[in-house]
Amino acid sequence: MKLGDYSLDILGGKLQKDGYILMKDNTQYKLLMINFSDKKCDAKVKIDGKLIGIWRVEPKQHIIIDRPSADTGLLTYYELGGEHSEKAQLFLNESLGLISVTYLPEKIKDTPQSTKTPALLGRQQASSICLAQKAPPYYCQPKAQEGCYQQAGGTGLSGESSQFFSRAEQINYQEESARTINVRLYSSNSDEARPLY
């Protein structure tokens, strides 16, 4: 998804229309965040309604994160009601499956402005993006096609990430230029094995 000078892609999922990301149960995924602008920005990331960290994205650069800033577990999608969802403490609510990234660009002029929590620097890069336009509404409903469903799901942690973050110096934000990109994870049984007839 691209909005202005910023982009968000979910590596490990498949972008559908209107900002939905098709996932498979128990799939580890990564966030690819791109800053096309000439200014530094901080990317404030919320998953399932929970703030998982703020990362610095340098001008004309991108970062990939595979874990929250305060935990080394890998971001993992779990289907609601699936084998792992209870252990991951996933419950049906309006934030389930929602990934929201707010890009806060640096304010260049020396005028007073609020300073936020220091961001973290990621040390991995990638080169692909997906494009779409709008944020999806809450999603959990049957699909019209008989025998096929679309299911809500959310994020837990599994395994251990080797990703390392360090502190970035604080920047003042040009808050009126902030941009938020929303996507929603979901799963489907359309790829499951079934008889020929």
Image (spheres, rainbow, N blue to C red):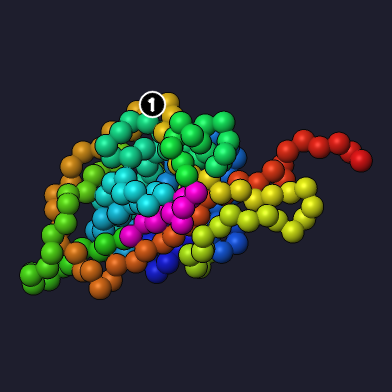
Q: Residue furthest top?
A: 159
- Residue 97 placement (x, y as % from top left): 48, 50
Identify the residue at horizontal 77%, vertical 55% (top origin): 145
Nearest the eye: 91 or 151: 91
Based on the displayed image, in which of its 4 quarters is residue 8 positioned?
Answer: bottom left
Q: What element carries label 1?
A: loop
Identify the residue at horizontal 77%, vertical 35% (top origin): 193
- Residue 93 placement (x, y as % from top left): 46, 52
Based on the displayed image, in which of its 4 quarters is residue 64 positioned?
Answer: top left
Nearest the eye: 99 or 143: 143
- Residue 60 placement (x, y as % from top left): 33, 57
Identify the residue at horizontal 28%, vertical 40% (top origin): 69
Amino acid tagged 1: Glu
Res. 179 visible in picture: yes
The stretch of residues the image draws in magenta is 92-102
| Residue on which disc 1 sits | 160
Look at the picture and state if 91 lies above or below 60.
Answer: above
Specify whether residue 100 is painted magenta. Answer: yes
